[in-house]
Amino acid sequence: MRRRILVIDDERNFREFLGEALEAEGYAVATAGTARVGLALAMRQPPDVVLLDQNLPDRSGLELVPEFRRLSASPAVIVITAYAAYPRAVEAIKAGAFHYLAKPFEFEELLRTLAQVCSARGPRDEAGESPALASIVGESPAILALKRQVVQVARSPVDTVLVCGESGTGKELVARAIHSASDRAGARMLSVNCAAFTDTLLTSELFGHERGAFTDAREQKKGIFEAAAGGTLFLDEIGELSARDQAALLRVLEQRTVIRVGGTEEVPVDVRVIAATNRPPDRLVTESGFRADLFYRLNIVRLTVPPLRARGDDVLLLAHHFSAAAAARFGVPARAFAPDAQELLRRYAWPGNVRELRNAVERAYAIGTGTHQIAAADLGTATGAPETGPAPPAIPFPEAKRRAIADFERQYVTTALERAAGNISLAARNSGIPRQVFQRLLRKHEVRPTY
């Protein structure tokens, strides 16, 4: 049985695009443009989740939150507004809202929030599949097996998990699914890219520090281990840890306590640690100098995310998924894939995996020539397709130029990371730009060493 979502927003285009995108994700969606119509629909067929615009023409969305919560089905309410302000977020939560999103938001962020909502409300269908798995798109045997493993691991008491897979396969999505399907879902999941920090800074970030521990330590700071108490900590690119940090991490995993930098007190921590690497696990120790004892401690349970080339027609499911997300982001109708594009999607090996596919689809929306369909040429030269012409004059030149530049930057740093196997320092060096500049581009375009 599909989860029912009610979208109430007075912006017709946004409302319709969101409805189409969520329908493509398997949700049953109803839409309304006013508070009056939305309440009527909710009373006629109670939804599981209400996506509620804060500023409606007939009433304030905040006024409606308690009314929706009093319905027999007591739907979870996610307040959405174009006017981002922390006090309003607090008001929404106090009124009973489950969460608060500010426009513009990433469609993936909405999907993660919906997965958390549905997980808290119980099984989605008779098969008992956890809604936390909704973000792992695919029906291939390899992905179905992975989903089963995710649920088993999430419900187990195991406190360390190792997720392996090539760059771009979706290791962080797997980690988030484990967290959302577990009894830790009510607490926080924090992510750390081990390759993005210097040794000293990473130690302070992970374990915290005491006042006066070093020059800029003006006050005590709790580390990420303490901040994630009761929840999950995702350590991306675990193979990039220095020898010193590996020793410190092993101690934390064994003792389940942390000692802040400059301190002596042992602070208990209750955290599930999910580590990820894009290196073959059998070569992590032998070729990179990773501590064998730490590897064995992390490798109690290992999940392997399959490469996209081994997932068959999942590539088409993912392409449609990313098309719906890109349509919502760009504010245009969702586009189908022309026969030549579908053939190309199946034929291409996708060395950058799911991340490369996502970027190719976004590129098609940014500078592709089609308005109703995505052709093979729109997917770019990286896939072996011929280069498209300039962006159509449907949007102003400055905007088309901005999108083209952003697309080039995103594609460039993504490819550079893939060629450097996720090593940021090496990727920056190969690109001929300072590491800080390369990292700034990664943050700007939300590109990570692992998808």
Image (spheres, helix red, strand yellow):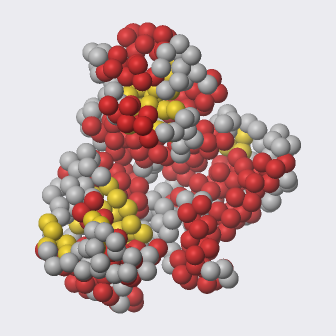
Residue 71 shown left or right of residue 280 in the figure: left
Residue 100 shown left or right of residue 376 in the figure: left
- The quadrant in which residue 303 appears is bottom left
Quarter of the N terminus within the rendering: top left
- The quadrant in which residue 71 appears is top left
Q: What residue is shown at x 43% (from left), y 80% (from top)? A: 198
Question: Is residue 49 or residue 190 the one in the foreground?
Answer: 190
Vertically, is 127 above or below 364? above
Q: What residue is shown at x 62% (from left), y 73% (from top)? A: 437
Vertically, is 419 above or below 224? below
Residue 22 shown left or right of residue 294 in the figure: right
User: In the rendered image, is residue 378 in sight?
Assistant: no
User: In the rendered image, is residue 193 in sight?
Assistant: yes
Residue 438 shown left or right of residue 146 in the figure: right
Q: What residue is shown at x 48% (from left), y 61% (from top)? A: 451
Q: What residue is shown at x 62% (from left), y 80% (from top)? A: 434
Question: Is residue 280 or residue 418 the one in the foreground?
Answer: 418
